[in-house]
Image (cartoon, grey):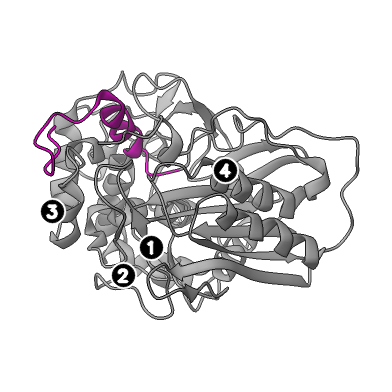
Amino acid sequence: MLDPTAGRPVPTLLKQAVRKIAALGLGTLLATAALAPTAHAAAPGLDRRELQRTLDEVPKGGLPGAYSAVQDGRQRWRGATGLADLEARRPMQPGMYHRVGSITKTFVATAVLQLVEWGRLELDAPVEQYLPGLLPDRRVTVRMLLNHTSHIGDYVSALITSPDSLEEMRVRQYTKDELVKLGLSVGASSEPGESPGSYSNTNYIVLGLLLDKVSGMPAERYVTRHVIQRAGLEHTFFPSASDLPRPHAKAYTSLFGSFPLRDFSTFNMSYVGTAGAMVSTMEDLNRFYRALLTGRLVGRDQLAEMRKTVPITLGPGSPDTMNYGLGLISYDTPCGKLWGHDGGIVGMATLSLSTEDGGKQTSSGINMTWHPETEAGQQAWIVHTVGAMCGTNRIAVSDAPMPLIDAGAPPAKL
């Protein structure tokens, strides 16, 4: 890889960081952020002043801004902090549209489990049964795609190969077939079904093709009709254009210091498709996870399947693992096990958490990823988000580095 501005090799640290970007999620965000319980109990209800106070710590740590929403029974809170536009000094607003990245995977998995419930798909059937000839290894099953134990290579590592890759990806239109071929060209990380699994966006692109075939309509339309609309979401969609609707924040990154900070809020999201292209708001994400975990979108048996987790890594050779179900991640926190997903995309990151019974949710987003000197802001973001679920007096964050996708390796300054 070459630095296009300096004409010299990109440091090894950037190469390592780019490999971590391939996960497009925040990985073992909570498991290794050293969120430790304290001696104090969580306060009942929503402490709105405390929620805003912890949210306000995020821009102090180097991130432009953040927004957040909490729903606890009938109680609701939403807030914002910092700047949506660094140049215009435009403030963040709570209801802004946001690219949610790999949280898209929970929506897609929900659609697949609906078809399982209706007898049109079998979880442990080979993908070959539905998409003959697509995958060279006929042992890969639908379940293996959903929980990342297929060990199909991640196509993203073949896309982000240099600092100028993002500009190339910004304007290009990709098809699902192209992305699957790229993933297969990367090579398998292990044998299908072996533990631990390995996070790969290619899995969810294949699931998109599976939905196309079995539902008889484009996967994006199927998810919209049977998941988004069924959950009553009014601000969630697969984008058909490169621009976000208003209001939205700008989406900043420097690819770990490879170039000056740049806005990527205009971006063709076909490169992530059914693995991470969706746009939503924090309140809609809360509504979605509440609908899912209270049984409004899939039945009890299918929800139980979604909660069957396996250990997976962020990619070949990664020491970090997470407990991954069928489109759901299980997070161990000071107030017990929480369910949800996270997502990291060019310039935006998101974390959605819910109690197992669907009684309480928190979703929050930030508008900068893959940029140096933002670890304090990311830590503050985690404290706010987990604190919204558990009570901020129950968590503490150590000085250990956090394995976020944009902080998984020290920043490379070119």
Query: Disc 3, disc 1: CB below 8 Å?
Result: no
The residue located at (40%, 29%) in the rendering is: 409
Q: Nearer the viewer, residue 298 or 269?
A: 269
* Residue under pointer 4: 376
In the rendered structure, the answer to whether residue 271 lies left or right of residue 17 reads left
For marks 2 and 3 on the same chain, the one whose residue lies earlier in the sequence: 3
Cα gap from disc 3 to disc 4, whole angstroms: 31 Å
Q: Is residue 325 visible?
A: yes
Percent x, y of residue 41: 90, 44
Q: Nearer the viewer, residue 175 or 242?
A: 242
Tell me which corner region of the image, top left, top right, bottom left or bottom right, holds residue 167. bottom left
Name which residue type carries label 3: Glu
Name which residue type carries label 2: Pro
* Residue under pointer 2: 239
* Residue under pointer 3: 168
Query: Disc 2, disc 1: CB below 8 Å?
Result: yes
SS type, badge 3: helix
SS type, badge 4: helix
* Residue under pointer 1: 278
Q: Nearer the viewer, residue 85 or 384?
A: 85
Q: Which circle marks residue 224 in the picture?
A: none
For marks 3 and 4 on the same chain, the one whose residue lies earlier in the sequence: 3
Name which residue type carries label 1: Met
SS type, badge 2: loop
Q: Is residue 280 magenta?
A: no
Q: Main secondary structure of the magenta part?
A: loop
The residue located at (80%, 50%) in the rendering is: 391
